[in-house]
Amino acid sequence: MTAAVRARYNPALGFIFVTAFLDVMAMGIVIPVLPALIFEFTGSNAEAGIYNGLFVALWAGMQFIFSPVIGSLSDRYGRRPVILISAAGLAADFALMALAPNLWWLAVGRILGGLTSSSFTTAFAYMADITEPEKRSRAYGLIGAAFSGGFVAGPMVGGILGEWGPRVPFWAAAGLAGLAFLYGLFVLPESLPEDKRMAFSWTRANPFGALRLLRSHPELSGLAIVNFLLYFAHHVFSVVFVLYAALRYGWGTWEVGLGLALWGVLDILVQAVLVGPAVKRFGDRTVMVCGLIVGAVGLGLLGFAPTGAWFVAGIFVSALWGFAMPTLQSLMTQRVSEQEQGQLQGANMSVGSIAGVASPLFFGFVYANSVGAKPVIDHPGLSFFLAGATLMAAAMLGWAVVRREVRRETKTPFT
């Protein structure tokens, strides 16, 4: 990339990072209060866990359907219009949820939110457009850091605003998403030239058609399964974290916000500062596998933690999971052409969305049956144990995929 091209895209890089920060902050603001709002409608902690899982699943289901459509649209019409329209839709979604009078309207809001947040696929494709393959781990690490920055600020702000009522944070989230739209409207250039665009096709744009791309390369298929398991485990935070911390340690919205913020700060440190040097020394593959293993240990510690202090220690360990996502993304983008980056990210989001449908329902069910008057398994940390086991399975599969690929490349055993 020439100096002139880099200068043109410097504002765009800032936009991608700022928009990622604002969008995730907007979503993070509602994390401490959405379960409380659901609890107002249900009156039961166990039922709140089930409904919270159901709403996350609705959100993910819409991502499954629309991520490949949005990714393919960005391959055809460019990244800029897709990102801007999605940002505006996200603002409307949070406003709708702020006004929701019952669970049905909350469900509608989650459906709209899943559709509009599918623009994350385009943000990753945008970075692939303007970044050399060998630098993508660091670029994705910086995006991940921006996500984590939003995840730090969002729950903290949500916890504070939640003291004035569970609906106040939704209005703040709507304002932030609207701010991201206005910022991008003035600073975001297009990253995909006309001559590199691909004709739109419903064969590729439907979620099952998009998934065919993941079968185009043996290692890509294996890495896609690792991606699924990673997303599956991650939803334990969105479904269980708030209810678990409140039940077991008596944490309110403020303490929960601080806990999530701590996890986010550590994730920023990992992805923005540590991923680049680690990849340079050890390579994408090794860093990915190690991140998954340490993340599994951290999740196990979260489930075991008998006190809030132990739980905080588990947050420190589990944050090292941040090594896995940017390196996994980098490995996958190196196996498709420039014209297919949007389709790949749509396929990746579809994989994540499948996990996002199944995982919240699963963890919501597990949590509901591990608490209450007559739990099936009397341990509220069971969900974290199962999420840790899922990450360990992802690490083992990732190791096997890496081992097979290195053997093919070097014709020698992997050591």
Image (tube, rainbow, N blue to C red):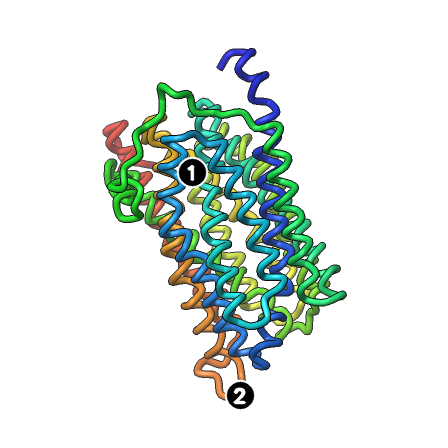
**Badge 1 density bin: few <14, some 14–19, many ≥20, Cα 10 Å:** many
Real-space Cα separation, disc 1 to disc 2, in angstroms: 43 Å
| In the rendered image, the vertical position of residue 106 relative to residue 9, given as above or below | below
Task: Look at label 1 and name its amino acid.
Answer: Gln
Residue 406 visible, this orientation? yes
In this image, 371 relative to 170: left or right? left
Residue 192 in percent (x, y) is at: 43, 24
Is the Cβ of the residue at disc 1 closer than 8 Å to that at disc 2? no
Coordinates of residue 179 in the picture (x, y in percent): 65, 41
> Disc count in the image?
2
The residue indicated by pointer 1 is 329
In the rendered view, tell whether residue 116 sits above or below residue 235. Answer: above
Q: Mark 2 points at which residue?
A: 373
Q: Earlier in the sequence, mark 1 or mark 2?
A: 1
Q: Residue 313: percent from the left, percent from the top?
A: 63, 58
Q: Quadrant of the C terminus?
A: top left
